[in-house]
Image (cartoon, rainbow, N blue to C red):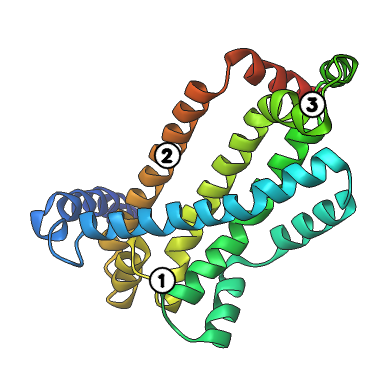
C-alpha cells in the first residue's frame, strides 16, 4: 500500500515536469502545426463566428426589443438553442454539407447567436422608462428614440452577450476539431490519439488562456465604448 502511495505521489511532479517540458519545447511552437499558428487559426474561427453572429443577432434583437414584436420567439429560440449540444450541432451540419471549415464555422455561428440575441433584446427592452418617456415628451420619433436613448443604454448588455458568446465559441471551436477544424483543438486531439497527456494538457491550458485574453480584450473595449455610468446602471438593473 505504501508503494502505491509513493507511485501516485511521484507521478504528479513527473506530469507537471512533462507539461512544462512540452510547453517550453520550441519545436512545439513553430511550423504549420505549432501552437502559434494553431492559436491564430483558433482565434480566426472565434472572431469570425462571433462577428457573423453579431451581424445577424444584434439587429434582430434590437428590432424585437424596440417594437416588442416576437419577444416570445426570442425567449423560445434562445432557450432551445442553448439546450442544443455544441458538438451535435456542428456534427449535424457537417453530415449535411460535408467536412470542411464552412459547415463547422456555420455551427459555431449558430451557437453564438442566442447569447448575442438575448443581450441585444434585453438591453433595448430594459431601457430606462423615464428616459424613453422624456424622449417622447421632447417629440423624438421612434427611430430617434432608438438611436439616441435605447441603443446607448443597451450597450452594456449587448457587449455582455458578445462576451458570453465568445467564451462559448472558444471552447466549442476546440471540440469542433473532431469534424475537420484546425486550431488548438487539433493539438489536443492529436495528443489524445497517441496518449500524450502532456500535449493534451498543454493544449487545454492554451485554450483557457486564449479565452481569458479574449474576454479581457472585450472587457477593455466595453470600458472604452460604454460610459461607466451605463455599466453600473446595467449591473444594478440585473440585481433588481
Indicate the quadrant where residue 3 lies: bottom left
Question: In percent of the image, x 35 and y 71: which residue is there?
Answer: 189
**Residue 125 placed where, x, y %?**
82, 35
Indicate the quadrant where residue 26 lies: bottom left
The residue that disc 1 covers is: 177
Question: In whole angstroms, how far apart are the C-alphas of marks 3 and 1?
Answer: 41 Å
Report the number of numbered marks. 3
Upstream in sequence: badge 2 or badge 1:
1
Q: 10 Å neighbourhood of mark 2: few (<14), some, or many (≥20)?
A: some
Q: Are marks 2 and 3 in contact (CB under 8 Å)?
A: no
Vertical comparison of 98 with 156: above or below: below
- State the residue in front, 100 or 226: 226
Helix, strand or loop under label 3: loop
The residue that disc 3 covers is: 127
- State the residue in front, 163 or 85: 163
Question: In percent of the image, x 52 and y 28: which residue is there?
Answer: 222
**Residue 153 placed where, x, y %?**
70, 24
Vertical comparison of 93 with 143: above or below: below
Helix, strand or loop under label 1: helix
The residue that disc 2 covers is: 212
Helix, strand or loop under label 2: helix
Task: Please state which of the two labelled residues, at mark 2 or mark 3, is closer to the viewer.
Answer: 3
Question: In whole angstroms, how far apart are the C-alphas of marks 2 and 3?
Answer: 30 Å
Image quarter hosting the C terminus: top right
Amino acid at each position: 500500500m505504501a508503494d502505491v502511495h509513493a507511485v501516485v505521489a511521484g507521478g504528479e511532479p513527473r506530469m507537471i515536469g512533462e507539461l512544462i517540458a512540452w510547453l517550453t519545447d520550441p519545436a512545439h511552437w513553430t511550423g504549420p502545426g505549432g501552437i502559434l499558428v494553431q492559436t491564430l487559426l483558433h482565434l480566426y474561427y472565434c472572431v469570425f463566428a462571433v462577428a457573423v453572429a453579431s451581424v445577424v443577432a444584434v439587429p434582430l434583437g434590437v428590432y424585437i426589443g424596440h417594437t416588442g414584436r416576437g419577444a416570445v420567439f426570442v425567449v423560445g429560440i434562445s432557450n432551445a438553442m442553448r439546450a442544443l449540444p455544441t458538438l451535435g450541432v456542428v456534427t449535424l451540419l457537417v453530415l449535411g454539407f460535408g467536412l470542411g471549415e464552412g459547415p463547422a464555422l456555420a455551427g459555431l455561428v449558430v451557437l453564438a447567436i442566442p447569447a448575442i440575441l438575448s443581450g441585444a433584446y434585453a438591453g433595448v427592452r430594459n431601457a430606462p422608462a423615464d428616459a424613453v418617456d422624456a424622449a417622447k415628451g421632447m417629440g423624438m420619433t421612434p427611430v430617434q428614440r432608438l438611436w439616441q436613448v435605447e441603443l446607448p443604454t443597451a450597450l452594456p448588455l449587448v457587449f455582455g452577450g458578445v462576451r458570453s458568446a465568445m467564451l462559448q465559441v472558444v471552447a466549442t471551436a476546440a471540440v469542433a476539431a473532431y469534424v475537420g477544424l484546425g486550431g488548438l483543438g487539433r493539438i489536443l486531439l492529436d495528443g489524445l490519439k497517441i496518449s500524450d497527456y502532456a500535449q493534451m494538457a498543454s493544449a487545454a491550458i492554451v485554450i483557457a488562456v486564449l479565452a481569458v485574453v479574449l474576454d479581457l480584450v472585450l472587457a477593455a473595449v466595453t470600458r472604452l465604448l460604454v460610459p461607466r455610468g451605463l455599466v453600473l446602471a446595467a449591473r444594478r438593473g440585473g440585481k433588481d
